[in-house]
C-alpha cells in the first residue's frame, strides 16, 4: 500500500507481518519478539549486524522493528533516492536472515537483560501486569517479550518453523509513504517481494471476557513511588462505539486540560504523570488510566479516578467539554500524520488492526458525529464493577483498603 506525499524528500518502507504474541503457545511465548531480533543479525549478502547497520548509517537513514500482540513490523526510512536500497535491505532481512545458532545463543542473553530492564521499570512493567490481570492464562495476557525460561529454551529449528508458518503472503503487508509515486512503489514491491511464501497462516487465540466482579493484582516491590493501571474492559477496534470511547478517553486523560490531569495532578498534587488510553485490538480492547503516586496516596488517587469516571456516566457532558475533546483528537490525528514514518505506521494500523482504510477526513467526521448522550451511554456501559481492574506495583502489602474502594 502506497501513500505518495507531494514534495516529500524522505520515504519510509514498513513491512508488517500479522503475527505476534497472540499467535503463540505457552511453550513458545516470546518467539515473535525473538525472531524480530534475529532479523538484524545478518544475511548472506549482509553477513552481520554491522553490515546491516552500516548500510543505513552511511545514507543517514534509520531502521528498526517492533513486536506487539497482533503484529510485527520492520521499517526503514531515508531520502527518496534510496528507496530501492530500503526495499532491498528489508526484503533481504525478510527472506534471507541466517538465524545463526551462535547468534541465537548470544541473543538469548540480550533478551533476558531486556526482560530484566523492563521489570526494573515499574512505570512500564505495570502495563504488563495490567494485561495479565485482564487475560490470565491467555496469550493476550502474556508478555510479548516472553519469559526467561522460554527465551533460553528456543532453538534455531523453533525459529525457522515459526518463520515458515507465519511469514507468508496472506500475513505480510508492505506500506510505503513519502516521495515515491504509487506506480513506482507497487512495481518495486512486486520486484523485491515476489518470492514471498504461500500457505495458510496460523490463527490467533480467542478472547474470553468472563469477569464478574472487580479484580486486583498487587506486586509488592520496594519503590519510591507506587505505579498503577486502573481501568475497565472496553471495545474492539471496529466496535460501533469506538469513536465515542475515544472522545471519552480524551475527556478523562487527553492532555493537560483533561479531567484526570486537573483533578489528580493540578488540584491535589498526587502524581507527576497521569494519563488515560483506549487500547484496541481486532477483537477486544480496554480503557486504562495510569499514574505514579506517593506510596501513601494510592487509595486516594484511585478513588479520585473512579469518581471522575462515575461522573461521566451520571452527568451529561457540556457542549464546551465535548468540543474540546473532539478538537484534541482531531489535532492529534493531523499532527500524527506529518512525516512519512508516522503515515506508514498509521496506514498499517488501519489495515492490520481495523481491516479497513478510512481517510483522515472520514475519521474526523466520525469524531465530530459523537454526541454528549453517546459519551454518557458508553460511560454507563463500561464503567461498571464487572469490568473494573487495578494492577499495582509498589511497597504496599495491604490490599483490603483498595478492595473497599474498587467499585463504581
Image (spheres, rainbow, N blue to C red):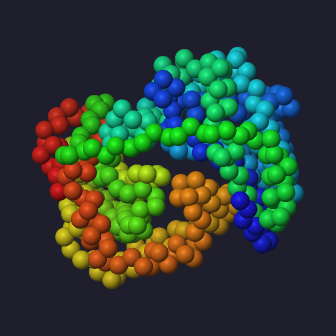
> Which of the two residues, 402 or 169, is positioned nearer the viewer here?
169
Q: How many marks?
A: 0
Residue located at (71% from left, 59% from top): 1
Q: Is residue 343 above or below residue 194?
A: below
Spot occupied by residue 230 in the image (x, y as percentages of width and height):
29, 49
Q: Is residue 194 above or below residue 149?
A: below
Spot occupied by residue 50 in the image (x, y as percentages of width and height):
79, 31
Residue located at (78% from left, 72% from top): 6
Spot occupied by residue 270 in the image (x, y as percentages of width and height):
27, 53
Asked whether the viewer can see residue 277, the reply is no
Image position of 382 (left or right of 173): left
Image position of 74 (left or right of 86): left
Residue located at (31% from left, 71% from top): 375
Residue located at (58% from left, 20% from top): 154
> Which of the two residues, 272 or 228, is positioned nearer the viewer here?
228
Image position of 367 (left or right of 76): left
Q: Is residue 158 above or below residue 188?
A: above
Image position of 112 (left or right of 305): right
Spot occupied by residue 80 in the image (x, y as percentages of width and height):
83, 59
Asked whether the viewer can see residue 105, the reply is yes
Dividing the picture into quarters, in which one does residue 95 lie? top right
Q: Is residue 372 above or below residue 170?
A: below
Quadrant in which the C terminus appears: bottom left
Amino acid at each position: 500500500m502506497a501513500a505518495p506525499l507531494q514534495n516529500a524528500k524522505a520515504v519510509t518502507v514498513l513491512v508488517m507481518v500479522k503475527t505476534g504474541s497472540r499467535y503463540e503457545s505457552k511453550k513458545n511465548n516470546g518467539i515473535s519478539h525473538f525472531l524480530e531480533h534475529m532479523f538484524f543479525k545478518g544475511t548472506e549478502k549482509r553477513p552481520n549486524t554491522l553490515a546491516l547497520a552500516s548500510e543505513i548509517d552511511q545514507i543517514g537513514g534509520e531502521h528498526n522493528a517492533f513486536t506487539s500482540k497482533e503484529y510485527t513490523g520492520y521499517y526503514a526510512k531515508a531520502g527518496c533516492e534510496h528507496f530501492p536500497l530500503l526495499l532491498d535491505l528489508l526484503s533481504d532481512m525478510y527472506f534471507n536472515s541466517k538465524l545463526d545458532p551462535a547468534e541465537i545463543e548470544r541473543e538469548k542473553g540480550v533478551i533476558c537483560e531486556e526482560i530484566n530492564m523492563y521489570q526494573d521499570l515499574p512505570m512500564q512493567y505495570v502495563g504488563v501486569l495490567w494485561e495479565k490481570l485482564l487475560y490470565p492464562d491467555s496469550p493476550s495476557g502474556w508478555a510479548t517479550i516472553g519469559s526467561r525460561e522460554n527465551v533460553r529454551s528456543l532453538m534455531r529449528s523453533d525459529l525457522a518453523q515459526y518463520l515458515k508458518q507465519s511469514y507468508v503472503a496472506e500475513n505480510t503487508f508492505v506500506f510505503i509513504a513519502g516521495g515515491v509515486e504509487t506506480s513506482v512503489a507497487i512495481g518495486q514491491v512486486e520486484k523485491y517481494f515476489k518470492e514471498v511464501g504461500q500457505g495458510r497462516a496460523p490463527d490467533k487465540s480467542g478472547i474470553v471476557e468472563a469477569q464478574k466482579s472487580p479484580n486486583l493484582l498487587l506486586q509488592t516491590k520496594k519503590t519510591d513511588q507506587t505505579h498503577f493501571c486502573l481501568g475497565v474492559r472496553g471495545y474492539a477496534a471496529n466496535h460501533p462505539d469506538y469513536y465515542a470511547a475515544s472522545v471519552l478517553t480524551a475527556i478523562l486523560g487527553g492532555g493537560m486540560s483533561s479531567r484526570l490531569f486537573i483533578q489528580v495532578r493540578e488540584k491535589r498534587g498526587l502524581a507527576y504523570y497521569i494519563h488515560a488510553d483506549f487500547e484496541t485490538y481486532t477483537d477486544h480492547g480496554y480503557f486504562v488510566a495510569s499514574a505514579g503516586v506517593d506510596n501513601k496516596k494510592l487509595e486516594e488517587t484511585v478513588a479520585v479516578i473512579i469518581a471522575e469516571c462515575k461522573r461521566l456516566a451520571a452527568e451529561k457532558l457540556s457542549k464546551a467539554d465535548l468540543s474540546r475533546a473532539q478538537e484534541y483528537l482531531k489535532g492529534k490525528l493531523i499532527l500524527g500524520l506529518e512525516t512519512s514514518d508516522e503515515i506508514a505506521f498509521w496506514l498499517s494500523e488501519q489495515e492490520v488492526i481495523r481491516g479497513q482504510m478510512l481517510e483522515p477526513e472520514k475519521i474526523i467526521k466520525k469524531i465530530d458525529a459523537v454526541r454528549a448522550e453517546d459519551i454518557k451511554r458508553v460511560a454507563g456501559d463500561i464503567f461498571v464493577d464487572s469490568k473494573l481492574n487495578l494492577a499495582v506495583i509498589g511497597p504496599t502489602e495491604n490490599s483490603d483498603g483498595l478492595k473497599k474502594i474498587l467499585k463504581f
